[in-house]
Image (cartoon, coloured by chain):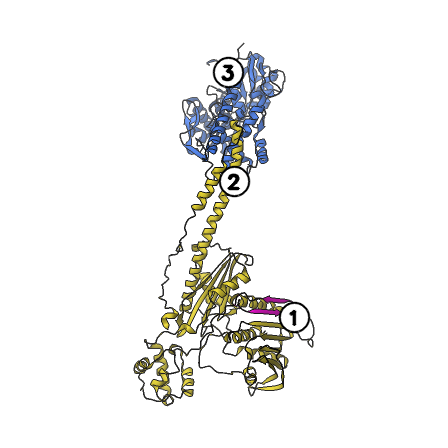
Amino acid sequence: MNKPRSKTTAEARKDKVEKALSSLGDKVYQDLDSGRFPSVTFASRSVRNIVYDRKLEQFILGSAQVKRAAGNIKHIRPFTQLLWLAYFSNKLVHEKRTSTLRDVYYSAQAFDVEFMDQAESDELITDLEVLLESAREEFNVFPEERSAIFGNLTVEYTVRGYEGKTLDLSSHPDGMMIGPALTTAEFKDTDADIVIAIEKGGLFTRFIEEKVHERYKAILVNTAGQPPRSTRFLLRRLHEELKLPIGILCDADPWGAHIAMVIKSGSAGAAHLRDLTTPSGVWLGVWASDIVKYKLPSDPLTEIDIKRLYELKADPRYKDKMWHGELDTFLKIKKKSEQEAFSRYGLSYIVDKYLPEKLQLLKSY
Amino acid sequence: MGVRELVENSLDAAELAGILPDVYVRIVANEASPENTEPRAYRLSVADNGPGVDPHQVPRAFGKVFYGSKYVLRQSRGMFGLGGTMAILYGQITTNKPVKITTSTDGKSRHVFEMLIDISENKPIIVRKDVEDAMGKTGTRVDLVMEGDFTRSAQKINDYFKQTALVGSYANLTFVDPIGRISTYERATEAMPPTPKETLPHPYGIDVEALKRMIKITDEKNMVNFMANKHFHRVGDTIAKKFLTFAGIDWRVAPEKLTNEQIVRIVDALQRFPDFLPPDASCLSPVGEQILQTGIIKELAPEFSTVVLRPPSSYSGFPFLVEVGLVYGGKVLEPGRKLFRFANRIPLLYDESSDVSFQVINEQIDWRRYHVPDEAPIAVITHIASTKIPYKTVGKEYIADRPEIEAEIKNAVRESLRRLSVFLSKKGSMEAVQRKMNIYGKYLPLLAKFSTELAGKKREPRYKQLLKDEEEAATEAQPEVTAEEGEKTDGEKIIEQTTIEDYR
């Protein structure tokens, strides 16, 4: 049984965010008090400033900086909105409350800093992430939940009202929703050896029914399509804190492949954040070559699929030989398959035959 | 409707006598004509406080067409003195009712004439004559019955009074319409424009017919004296002799002895002779900046207005000058450009788009250059004063595009626009400062509040000083706007202007 590496990881992250928030407040306060217009400087998120870092295996922001100055009449409104966000997040963190992107948009209206639309408030939340160098989940702003987790893992909540309470994540057969409470919970106890992230709810349920968590000592995560950041963050924590290898299972098409890639290497949109990627994650399948190997029922690639494949081929994240080879195979066979395609060989085939072969890939870690 | 002709006569009469004009106009539907039909008979009454008309002159002045043929020129409203008579004649033709003239020159006795015009004989027929007590008031009142369509004319009549008040801010005008609604335009200044002086015709403006008429009435015995003495404007002995030599006419010949061929030769030479002096403009009477500004403020209550008076100039031997008023914003003007045209202080109400002023402001001026938006509430007032207004048609409603007049209007409008542009940019930067301060005023307190909380402080930072400093800096940093902004006149030639003083 693996021991959680650190009991205070969640605490440490909370401290870091609180410190960043209060130092931002300090700076603005000092400027105002000494008769200066405050300003903040942070990395630019413009497309030209997003570069791929080979060492980190993810997109990062380059050296270009942007300055938001309250003295600039065009900046003072977004500057104030940014500071309000900091103020609002600070309250969330201190009061151990959580909020959603939509919530934030509406909350602003009570403070006279209303946003024109949610896109504007989302944009500024991202600015604050860059400024604080923390994901919004760390200052308690979460997306709508849709991912789920299941397995032999006991967590201890840190959210208000549940501090110290524990939960066994195998206690509910539908899985537990990955929300603010789970994302910020401390990992207490587990006997799992691996984590399998699955693109679709159907297969996730099948795996639970087939007791994959017991047979392969696996924690199962339903990413529900492209995983939300909180899920990517949780996957990374499972890997970092519990030292569990992460395997990713998705549909055999460019979109499925990219789900695996985003878990591994992140997205350009989150180039300013570091704790969302799991570079050692392994794309278990379903590969293009699996379609051939397992003679899976398939559909022809659409024009959009093909266009997407060419885009991915040009993407620096796909430079790896294996990944590149699979993209080429897609283009060669011009076919795609879903995870469910294995059902042609019986409902448990994927768990009994396919999965053990694929899990060999995780052994190398 | 005849309103204009009679009102203009009244204004001219009072002004020539140096009296601040009070003019009362009333239109009443004639009881005899059936109701609710148009056109119908109306009684039009126009009364003034002018000097009155000598009772001996009344029958001829009001009852004869072409009374007082002129051999002198003067800037006046009335069109060759005909306007009033034409209105009377029109009334008589449409209703066959006599006109009633009541006039007093001394304020003691008041002479009443009721008369008709014998059209075939062109002479007045007195129907009734009377003397009453004038009760201390001088002036003239004309009552006539005429057929008209008031419903259709109402708008133009109202426009006429409004615009007359614009350039005649020294007059009291009262108008009572057939429904009994009273419009009053009150005097806002005691200043009156100077009385225009009479002047002789300039040689450039003489045609064959005019020369023949002059020869008929002259008592000069030779051509030098005829040219030099009392018939032509600014022609003396020296110039007369030089001209006659130029035209090839014997100095000593008597005017009445000239042959037709010689007369044509003279008229032709008048046009070509290079040494005539330019016409003297002292006979012109502009409305003047004060009177026009007073009228503008009174009638349009604007946010900004300016008046540009151009120095006199001339076309074809006729002196003229151009005044332009530019009005922006305020309570009365609506978005868009409005043009008010005046010729010798008469509002021109019809055929606007054919007028030279319309062409200039809509086609020759680049408004964007002055940063004036198309939808800005703007009124342009153009006044052309001349001893002879170059109307394009006999209707006398719009002015021809004489290049000399066009250039003057263009210059005046441009100058006024430069002034507006300066005003607008000052206003713009004032507003920008205000907007800026409003924004700071809204957000700085919020920044103070949020940062206090974030930093965990007790008291708010002293941001108010920042707000104050910023306001001072912004107000001081008002950019100086130069009048020349954006104005590089392409293809506009700067015409050397001679002022009135230079001519004297």
Locate residue B117, reporting x and y percent. 58, 84
**Residues at marks 2 and 1 touching, judged by CB atoms closer than 8 Å:** no
Tell me, yes or no, if residue B440 can be seen here. yes
The answer to whether residue B249 is left or right of residue A361 is: left
Q: Amino acid at mark 2?
A: Gly
Question: Which one is earlier in the sequence, the residue at label 2 or at label 1?
Answer: 1
**For residue B113, what is the image quadrant?**
bottom right
Locate residue B253, reporting x and y percent. 33, 89
Q: CA distance from mark 3 to mark 1?
A: 98 Å
Q: Amino acid at mark 1?
A: Pro
Locate residue A82, reporting x and y percent. 51, 33
Labelled disc at residue B178: 1
Residue at 46% in and 48% down? B429
Helix or strand or loop: what does disc 2 sit on? helix
Which residue carries the number 3 mark? Answer: A241
Q: CA distance from mark 2 to mark 3?
A: 49 Å
Which shade of the palette goes to chain B? yellow
Which shade of the palette goes to chain A? blue
What segment is highlighted magenta in the picture?
Answer: B168-195
Mark 2 or 1, which is nearer the eye? 2
